[in-house]
Amino acid sequence: MSQEYIATGRRKTAVARIRMTAGSGKIEINGRTFEEYFPTPSLQNTVLKPLEIAQSTTTYDVRVNAEGGGPTGQADAVRLAISRALLLVDANLRTPLKVEGLLTRDPRMKERKKPGRPGARKRFQFSKR
């Protein structure tokens, strides 16, 4: 069997675990085709960007398990996972991927609600009298 590269990508609360093998460029996400899972061109371009930079859109088959978050968060998580897997394939890709900002994890998440307040930072209405 050919070499299998495993990587994880995260953004906000979305997590994408991928298995990348040599193949024909087929991408499968949660058992569905890539075009079916991410119907908009912008989300599709987001996911394909690292493969385009590495000039290997038809070189690898990618199987993805994505969960949590929404479509944009999942697309960015898949993008990060693919970028990390490409680094395992060829360490020379680090510079072009880094220049495009594809190796940076987006840590922004919803802030937790604090006790004694209606939200994370909001206060209950103050009444002077």
Image: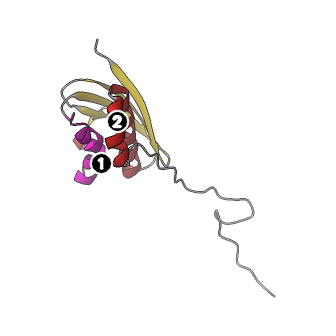
Examine the rendering and report whether any part of residue 34 can be seen: no
Please, is residue 121 above or below residue 128 in the view?
A: above
Of residues 27 and 30, the one nearer the viewer is 27
Instruction: Tell me the crowding category of disc 1: few under 14, some 14 to 19, or many 20 or more residues within 10 angstroms, Cα based.
Output: some
Please, is residue 100 above or below residue 91 in the view?
A: below
Please, is residue 70 above or below residue 82 in the view?
A: below
Q: Per the image, is 42 magenta?
A: yes
Examine the rendering and report whether any part of residue 18 can be seen: yes
N-term-proximal mark, 1 vs 2 = 1
Residue drawn at 65 percent across, 66 percent down: 121
Q: Is residue 23 left or right of residue 70?
A: left
Outermost residue to the bottom = 129
Residue drawn at 36 percent across, 30 percent down: 91
Please give the residue where the numbered disc 2 appears in the rendered image. Answer: 82
Tell me the quarter of the image containing the C terminus: bottom right
Badges 1 and 2: C-beta atoms under 8 Å apart?
Answer: no
Q: Which residues are magenta?
A: 38-57
Q: CA distance from mark 1 to mark 2?
A: 11 Å
Point out residue 42 in the picture as x, y percentages from the top left corner.
26, 53
Residue drawn at 29 percent across, 30 percent down: 62
Tell me the amino acid under the disc marked 2. Ile
Q: How is the image coloured?
A: secondary structure
Q: Which mark is residue 103?
A: none
Which picture quadrant has residue 34?
Answer: top left
Is label 2 in a helix, a strand or a loop?
Answer: helix
Of residues 25 and 98, the one nearer the viewer is 98
Count the marks.
Answer: 2
Please give the residue where the numbered disc 1 appears in the rendered image. Answer: 46
